[in-house]
Image (cartoon, grey):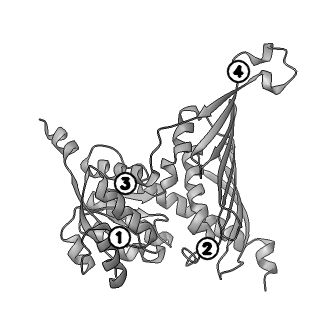
Amino acid sequence: MTGREKAQGRRVRVGVVGAGVLGFHHIRLLKKIEGAELVGFYDHNTARAAQVAKELETVAHPSLEALLDNVEAVTVVVPTPAHVEIALPVLERGLHALVEKPLADTLPGAEQLVHTARERKVCLQVGHVERFNRAVRAATPYLDEPRFLQTERLAPFQPRGTDVAVILDLMIHDLDLVLELVRSEVGEVRATGVPILTPHVDIANARVEFANGAVAVITASRVSRERTRKLRIFQPTGYFSLDLAQGKGDFYRLKDGWQGFGATRIEEIVEHVKLDAPEAEPLKLELESFLRAVRGDGNVVVTGAAGLQALALAYRVADAINASPLAAARP
């Protein structure tokens, strides 16, 4: 067996920092993933830590240092304002880290994480889990120079995540997706948004124009009655309608030679492709990809640089909101 084959087969000693709603699922999945050896987790809330340790039958470490002493990689699942405080010492130790989105709550903090990971030559992955969405995976083989994109991410209000604006809480998922799909330099950014139930912006709409001519219109709300996650993509060869919540989608593409059909109805020149991809829990796929990168068996899917790029765009959206006439009219 070669050294590479041994690396591919070995289990990664991994831990989780943070045992809240999402951290619980990190722990749950890492217990089951074949390539992981879950060492345990750390959460500063001792009552919550004891509860999760009992429920998931794993070890709650008494301190962050105690956990880090026993792992080679961690997932950081703490509130966004604490990302740098937790992830920086992880990376400085030479440990690999998957940091939940957004990478940080400030650009300097995110830049510091990216720089440290590069300097220490460790993997830094950002938890933009929508990259692993079933509908996105199904659409990928058909994507060809998207030109116009529309996203809607609407959710009922809940206190979790309201320590930051909806741009960093929800919209950043779609900002990352749009950047990955278009792959062009960002040009002009226009946006509006308002706070409703928190001191931060709770509903926002942004228009992002790219150097290659593509345009994205992105809407996010955390004060909606129903939960919606939709992505529509228009490209020269057709149109995608993706339901990210259901993991399903459709692709309508022009049939070859359609100009000569003499058609009188659009249905005569358009082929409907029902998009499908293997069913899998996106978070599980994300964690598996991180472990492969740690073993040297694959590339980091969402790099620290990509997370930084999404965060930079999020702050451009926030700046555009603050400069909008709607913001100026607020008391």
Indicate the quadrant where residue 226 lies: bottom right
In this rendering, the count of numbered labels is: 4
Which residue is outermost to the left?
A: 1
Mark 1, Cα crowd under 10 Å, few <14 / some 14-19 / many 20+, is many
Tag shown at residue 287: 3
Tell me which label, 3 or 4, sits earlier in the chain.
4
Read off the residue under disc 2. Answer: 165
Q: Give the amino acid at mark 2.
A: Ala
Q: What element carries label 2?
A: loop
The residue sitting at 42% across, 73% down in the picture is 20
- For the residue pair 182 and 252, the one nearer the viewer reads as 252
Q: Distance between the residues labelled 2 and 3?
A: 26 Å
In front: label 2 or label 4:
4
Tell me which label, 4 or 1, sits earlier in the chain.
1
> In which quadrant is the C terminus drawn?
bottom right
Mark 3, Cα crowd under 10 Å, few <14 / some 14-19 / many 20+, is many
Tell me which label, 1 or 3, sits earlier in the chain.
1
Q: Are marks 2 and 1 in contact (CB under 8 Å)?
A: no
The residue sitting at 54% across, 75% down in the picture is 160
Mark 2, Cα crowd under 10 Å, few <14 / some 14-19 / many 20+, is many
Residue 101 at what x, y percent from top left? 48, 63
Q: How far apart are marks 1 and 3 (CA)?
A: 17 Å
In front: label 4 or label 1:
4
Q: Are marks 2 and 3 in contact (CB under 8 Å)?
A: no
Mark 4, Cα crowd under 10 Å, few <14 / some 14-19 / many 20+, is some
Q: Give the amino acid at mark 4.
A: Lys
Read off the residue under disc 4. Answer: 255
Read off the residue under disc 1. Answer: 87
